Image (cartoon, grey):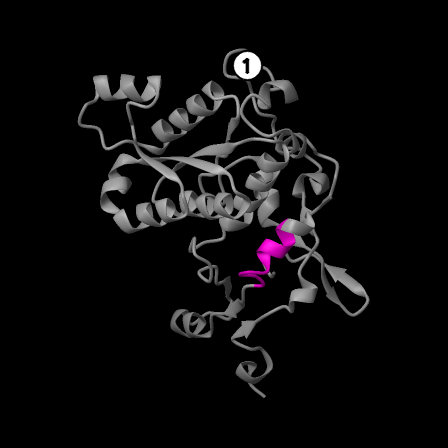
Amino acid sequence: MSNYETIPYKTYLDESEMPKFWYNVRADMKKKPAPLLNPATGKPMTAQELEGVFCKELVAQELDDETQLIPIPEEIRDFYKMYRPSPLVRAYCLEKQLGTPAHIYYKFEGNNTSGSHKLNSAIAQAYYAKHQGLKGVTTETGAGQWGTALSMACAYLGLDCIVFMVKVSYEQKPFRREVMRTYGARVTPSPSNTTEIGRKILADFPETDGSLGCAISEAVEYAVGHHRYKKKSLLVSSTGLNHLISFYKKVQVHFGQNNYFFPGLN
């Protein structure tokens, strides 16, 4: 019997098998990651300092090196059911083209409006912002997938969403920009005249196409200057803060009487 008959192209979990925890990989790391440093003092940032930008619950998770499993709130799990479980796909054709004995798998994350896995993190961050009593969130986005994900999450939870989108992407990707606006987000090309840092960059470099660093700076400035807002920052899945990584590592898949941790399967 060939592998084609024994291993399906696509593997799905049932909704009842969806995990109820996020996996904090740092709890199992013998050598813990270096702490975030305060750029002004060069010392590890405290919870109080981080809470100037991020929600309290996110700060608690960011600084937690001990808790392995973090419960996923039921409201977030219900939201996930709109587009998860997503399939784990065996890449048979790619294996054949490469002539490799390796088994290659990938996750298909295009079955939600945001078009990526970023919605997993966006809904969690928006949820904690709402439960802290915030009016809305601010963020940066490059090509627009993260901005779309956060816009969708905020619309679901009734939060305002302020998006600073890199200027060149704002101009080149009108459809992505308008999807965010369809969900009620306020999308501003960055750099902009909305913030002090944006105005300074425009004065020094009037022809700039913008950058993700500039958009982040504007989002942070806006969040700090508007006490009912907090910044929700995510660059890409492999680059970000500790709690963002945890939101992508959903665990607890059951096989028989054993629990196996598969961060990407569900």
- Which image quarter holds the N terminus? bottom right
Q: Which residue is mark 1?
A: 42
Name which residue lies at 74% across and 39% down.
Answer: 67
Left or right of 230, for residue 23: right
Examine the rendered structure and indicate whether residue 34 appears above or below residue 145: above
Give residue 176's position: percent from left, percent from top.
32, 49
**Which range of residues does the magenta coloring cover?**
76-85
In the image, 110 versus 96, the foreground residue is 110
Give residue 105's position: percent from left, percent from top.
52, 65
| Residue most extreme to the front | 158
Amino acid type at circle 1 is Gly
| Residue most extreme to the left | 207
Left or right of 250, for residue 237: left
Give residue 100's position: percent from left, percent from top.
46, 69
Residue 82 lies within the magenta run: yes
Residue 212, visible in the rendered structure: yes
Name which residue lies at 43% across and 56% down.
Answer: 113
Residue 102, visible in the rendered structure: no
The answer to which quarter of the image holds residue 68 is: top right
| Residue most extreme to the top | 41
| Residue most extreme to the bottom | 1
SS assignment at label 1: loop
In the image, 30 versus 163, the foreground residue is 163
Left or right of 30, for residue 174: left
The answer to which quarter of the image holds residue 44 is: top right
Residue 213 lies within the magenta run: no
User: Neighbour class for label 1 at 10 Å: few (<14), some, many (≥20)?
Assistant: few
Examine the rendered structure and indicate whether residue 228 appears above or below residue 176: above
Name which residue lies at 53% across and 61% down.
Answer: 83
- Which image quarter holds the C terminus? bottom right
